[in-house]
Image (cartoon, rainbow, N blue to C red):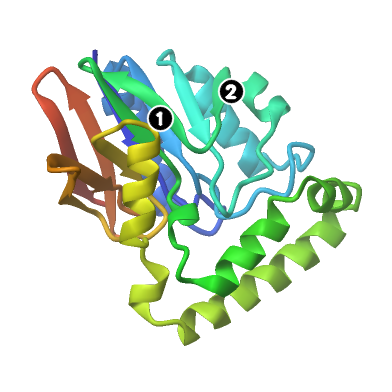
Amino acid sequence: MSKLFISDLHLAENRPEICAAFYQFLNNEAQKADELYILGDFFEIWLGDDHQTTFNQEVINALADLETPIFIMHGNRDFLLGGSFCEQTSSTLLVDPTVIDINGEPILLMHGDSLCTQDKQYMLARQQLRDENFQRDFLSKTIAERQVIADSIRDESKELTRETADNIMDVTPTEVEMAMTAHHSRTLIHGHTHRPGVHDLTLDTVPAQRIVLGDWDRQGWFLESSRKGLNLVSFEIA
């Protein structure tokens, strides 16, 4: 069974080349796959399922037209994706973390931001944004009010990113090991860090792997699983 994994597309109306590349991906690779997994930050921002725009509907329609089953996980940009979005796209919302089976092996799926525990300021912000009371209050506001709040949060996040060392914004190795051990998995697939690659590690003397999905910018990225194993693929975006 062929499964495809993508993350961090950050789809937005002002990124038409990324959207075009994604639609092409849906019509080609995704159409041939048995399952498609989107591991967070699919959108640059998602203000709520009731935020109805032409752009949002175009993306929803593209997903709805795909016959391949879709599984989607919240990221730090689109954690307000909800039941209405999933219903319209016929997709399944995954909890973070989730374990799936690939070729008889338990594979751990995460967005990846919860692994960056050295970035204390980000973790505090994440805790607030994922709080049910905060989200309920946020969604009770008008779209215009939500946009103002979201812009403020994003500007603050960019400023913190400029001030934070690269190694602190990456995953914490001990956190990775604890997550994989807790879920009895020797393979972790995640996004968020925008540092695509395959990392070998050892868990209790047993070989293991951490596979990082890439963000879509000048290059697009997807991970393909087949009977032959896992293959991280990149391609140019015009």
Query: Which residue lies at the image location 58% right of the left edge and 23% below the top edge?
Result: 89
Instruction: Judge from the rendering whether residue 81 lies leftward or rightward of residue 34; answer left or right.
Output: right
Cα distance between the residues tagged 2 and 1: 13 Å
Q: Is residue 24 above or below residue 31?
A: below
Q: Earlier in the sequence, mark 2 or mark 1?
A: 1
Please tell me whether mark 2 sits on a helix, a strand or a loop: helix
Q: Quadrant of residue 14?
A: bottom right
Q: Is residue 151 above or below residue 11?
A: below
Name, please, the residue furthest toward the left.
Answer: 228
| Mark 2 residue crowding within 10 angstroms, few (<14) / some (14–19) / many (20+) | some
Name, please, the residue furthest toward the bottom.
Answer: 163
Please tell me whether mark 1 sits on a helix, a strand or a loop: strand
Residue 213 location (% of width, % of height): 30, 48
Q: Quadrant of residue 86?
A: top right
Viewer-nearest residue: 63 or 132: 132
Name the quarter where the C terminus is drawn.
Answer: bottom left
Query: Which residue lies at the image location 39% right of the left edge and 55% below the top edge?
Result: 175
The amino acid type of the residue labelled 1 equals Tyr
Name the quarter where the N terminus is drawn.
Answer: top left
The amino acid type of the residue labelled 2 equals Thr
Instruction: Judge from the rendering whether residue 187 lies leftward or rightward of residue 84; answer left or right.
Output: left
Query: Which residue lies at the image location 41% right of the left edge and 70% below the top edge?
Result: 169
Q: Is residue 151 above or below residue 230?
A: below
Q: Which residue is mark 2?
A: 89
Q: Quadrant of residue 7?
A: top left
Q: Which residue is mark 1?
A: 37
